[in-house]
Amino acid sequence: MPVDNKKVAKNTLFLYFRMILMMLINLYASRVILKLLGVEDYGIYNVVGGVVTLFTFVSNAMMAATQRYLNVYIEKGNPEDTKKIFSACIVIHIVVALIVILLSEIAGLWFMYKKMVIPEARMDAAFWTFQCSVISTAIVVFSSPYKAMIVAYEKMSAFAYVSIIEAVLKLAILYVVAIFSVDRLIFYSILFMAVTSLIALSYAAYSKINFSESSIVVRGIDASLYKELISFSGWNFLGNIANVCLTQGTNILLNVFFGPVVNAAKGIAVQVQHAVEQFCTNFQMAQNPQIVKMYAANELNEMHNLVFRSSRFSFYLVLIFAVPIMMKTDALLVIWLQNPPEYSSVFVRYTMGFILIQSLANPLLTSSLATGNVKKIMLIIATLFCCVIPISYITLRFGASPISVFQIQLALYVVAHILRIWIVSEQIQFSVKQYLLQVIKPIIFVSSLAFSINFVLELLFLDTIISSIVYCIISCCISVVISLFIGLSKDERRGIINFVKSKF
């Protein structure tokens, strides 16, 4: 089964349209919301929302499982079996949504009131922000199988269209919050909950209208199917717990030791991280169904080539934007936010390191999920990532700065990727040497050259607004040229150039 390059390219275009639109809106929204709420309330919003995110790892695990099984059964061409898989996933997600609500209202509220550092005067606002986040999370959990169905059928245009609605609504929220004289943290949380819920339900509506397999059947589903889905998701669930430790767990630690102001700085870094990582996430979203389908068709050589190519392309997409951001972090934050919270600059630089490594990790993880045998990779990687909380806690107890948490996390990312290469190479039968030669060697050379040239270039520019913007544009162009002519093979370069010519 050859790679459907035309479909991948088309889906990538839709996803990039969606990404650029959402990135611009989210970056603008972050600046306005920071100004409207203030640093303290902005930090509260980030950390309280993070408490609920602790329970969304179940949804992420189940969505990955749903997409994997849908891809396999769609490839087999049996609509009735696909419908049963989808229906079983819906039932499981309803149960999970109820569990999320229950755990959030018991454990989440207890932790918020007893352990988190929130000014007494803002506890009521934090409570209602928390409740809005719980409702949003439950709805998103329920709608996840519908979103997985859209991805499995590679109808990426749906994400672009729905994102237009989402962008307009998010802009409307900023306007409404600014003109009303109410508690802005509570009001913003309510409006954001409404938009998040509407978007999640829009994906569900699209899926039900366009895919007959999205109809729910209650009878005829064998109990073994539920057992298989839960077993597969259980190990993926463990991996998502680890991701929570790396993200929201560290966010809570920073709150306990340093308060909401440092959470605001981390929130800014996360916004930048999400904006940049979308450049590879959307590319990978278009590639992932093809990887799963190739494994299902037993086309392992084609699968290996696609995984390696996806890894390199993803890294270059992140590198293009990571280099100027890391070189001009302070100037860019001032342009964006005017008065960024303390630690924002250094946090942003470390998050760029995170997503450079993570861009390489996702194609390997998709390959592992395609095999259905995720026990080993999830157990080892999750155990490693969960260590970030105790190690960071001990480090902070000895008086370390907030930066130490990011340093620990970066070190664990590197170790985890080494282990990931070793595990997945056994699962889908490629040699580690092959991966090192086709992925690691070219990206090291490209990134070293890009950073070296941009370091020299940076010395020629001042820290004024115009100068910084010009530098970033030139820096991105340099990284594109280096990636295109040094990081890619002739065939890959020719394919990209021909594709661009055909569109423009």
Image: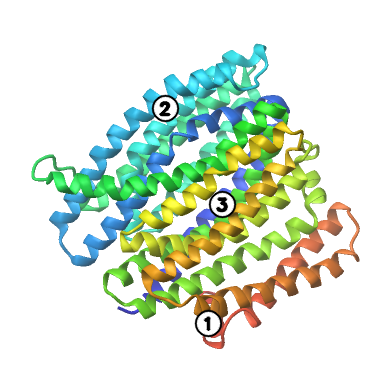
Instruction: Tell me the residue at 77%/40% (across/down).
Output: 343
Residue 122 picture location, percent across and down: 64, 15
Q: Is residue 120 or residue 136 the one in the foreground?
A: 120
Q: Where does label 1 land, which residue?
A: 492
Residue 171 sits in quarter: top right
User: Mark 2 to mark 1: distance in Å?
Assistant: 45 Å
Relative placement, left or right, of 225 versus 483 is left
Relative to 363, residue 378 above or below: above
Task: Assign a secondary structure to mark 3.
Answer: helix
Q: Where does label 2 land, which residue?
A: 135
Select label 3 or label 1 by which is in front.
1
Q: Residue 244 carries which label?
A: none
Residue 41 picture location, percent across and down: 66, 25
- Considering the image in quadrants, where does the N terminus appear? bottom left
Which numbered disc, 3 or 1, marks the residue that appears first in the sequence?
A: 3
Q: Is residue 399 or residue 196 the one in the foreground?
A: 399
Relative placement, left or right, of 466 versus 277 is right
Relative placement, left or right, of 432 versus 234 is right
Q: Where does label 3 land, which residue?
A: 21
The disc labelled 3 sits on which kind of residue? Answer: Leu
The disc labelled 2 sits on which kind of residue? Answer: Ile
Relative placement, left or right, of 242 versus 343 is left
Question: What residue occupies the far bottom of the structure in this picture?
Answer: 490
Task: Assign a secondary structure to mark 2.
Answer: helix
